[in-house]
Image (cartoon, helix red, strand yellow):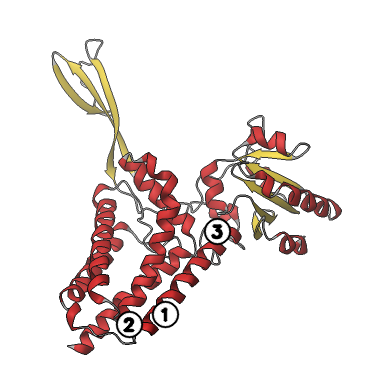
Amino acid sequence: MKKFLLLVRWIVGLLFIFSGLVKANDPLGLSYKMQEFFEVWGLHFLNDYTLAFALIMNLFEIVAGVAVIIGWRMKLFSWLLLLLIIFFTFLTGYALFSGKIKTCGCFGDCLPLTPAQSFGKDIFLLLLILILFFTAKKIKPAVKPIGAMVLLLLATVGVGYGQYYVLQHLPIVDCLPYKKGNDLLEQMKTPANAIPDSFSIVFTYKHKGKLLEFDQANFPADFDSTYEYVDRKDKLIKKGNGLQAKITDFSLQTLSGNDTTAAVLGTEAKYLLLLVKDFDHSADWLSGFDQVKEAAKKKNLPVLIVTADADRAQTSLPNSIILKCDATVLKTFARVNPTYVLMQGATVLSKTSYIDLTQLLSQL
């Protein structure tokens, strides 16, 4: 029995530590996923707190994982883990059965799971945690109280600093389609074996006091002006295989609204993009931009400002080439606002936070 409980503790502990570490690598990604759930539920007022929720959740998962492995205060942590896994199971179950959320973000973007896989994983964890919950009194700590406190303190400080670091300097491991080395044009191509969903347009009309539904291929033979239009909707006829381009919404536009994506990505020379979601804290980096712009000028390296805030960009960065891009795309492209991206054609050569100015200047 002791060996079995030890195995269960290690499985549960390692899974929570792994899950927490993967998400701690990109806490902003988890906060955006939380916002997706809140948008679906209409809880928009919570969007401003999602980053704090993400930081705390990642920290708790790792600390709880360590506590379970060393068997420290199992009565407390078995309760906390049980509540957490019930909550996670609800989220993954909602994503699976509602169809409104494509992925739950359980292991971040580095290990995307389908809703079915996520729900199955949580059911498995729920069973293991229930075993720990009902046998908590039998589990003895593997280390002395002072040793346990030191380990948990080190985990807390380490995870806290790690999350602070990636929020300032970009994720240590970039798992998004805009990562270093990727060709954006290739990422924008639909896979050759992709099969899209098939839909039929279903119309609803009122005729002689009755509501009638029919698709575009089966209009009534006597259809005329006596049929009163009510509604139309798309009905799923056949589900596709879910394959699609990894990048589906990247677009660059000039200030006049012309699409210049192909022209920019099609160039053969190197150039530098400055991705600026907004200019709320521009005082923190504008002076550094002047240094970068001067260094790039000496190397004949074009600098393009890509932003969702074009009006303030023209005011803050006069005499610059400014391109418009969707804010959601920019949040995916670069987690730090702003981020410098060194490009050659459509290939990402490097991504650098505005804080790492020395590193960026050495790359130019």
Q: What is the C-alpha distance between the residues marked 3 and 2? A: 30 Å
Q: Which mark is residue 63?
A: none
Counting from the top left corner in percent of width and height, residue 219 is at 24, 23
Q: What is the C-alpha distance between the residues marked 3 and 1? A: 24 Å
Q: Residue at x 42, y 57 (%)?
A: 54
| Upstream in sequence: badge 3 or badge 2 | 2
Name the image quarter holding residue 278: top right
The residue sitting at the left extreme is 209
Q: Amino acid at mark 2?
A: Ile
Q: Determine whether 72 is above or below 233 in the image.
A: below
Q: Amino acid at mark 3?
A: Leu
Name the residue beneath numbered marker 1: 151
Q: What is the C-alpha distance between the residues marked 1 and 2? A: 9 Å
Q: Residue at x 37, y 66 (%)?
A: 60
Name the residue beneath numbered marker 3: 167
Name the residue beneath numbered marker 2: 70
The residue sitting at the right extreme is 298
Specify whether residue 203 is in view: yes
Q: Nearer the viewer, residue 309 or 73?
A: 73
Specify whether residue 192 is in view: no
Name the image quarter holding residue 321: top right
Q: Nearer the viewer, residue 70 or 232?
A: 70
Q: Amino acid at mark 1?
A: Leu
CB under 8 Å between callouts 1 and 2? Answer: yes
Residues packed near mark 1 inside 10 Å, few (<14), some (14 to 19) or many (20 plus): some
Counting from the top left corner in percent of width and height, residue 96 is at 27, 53
Dot 3: element: helix
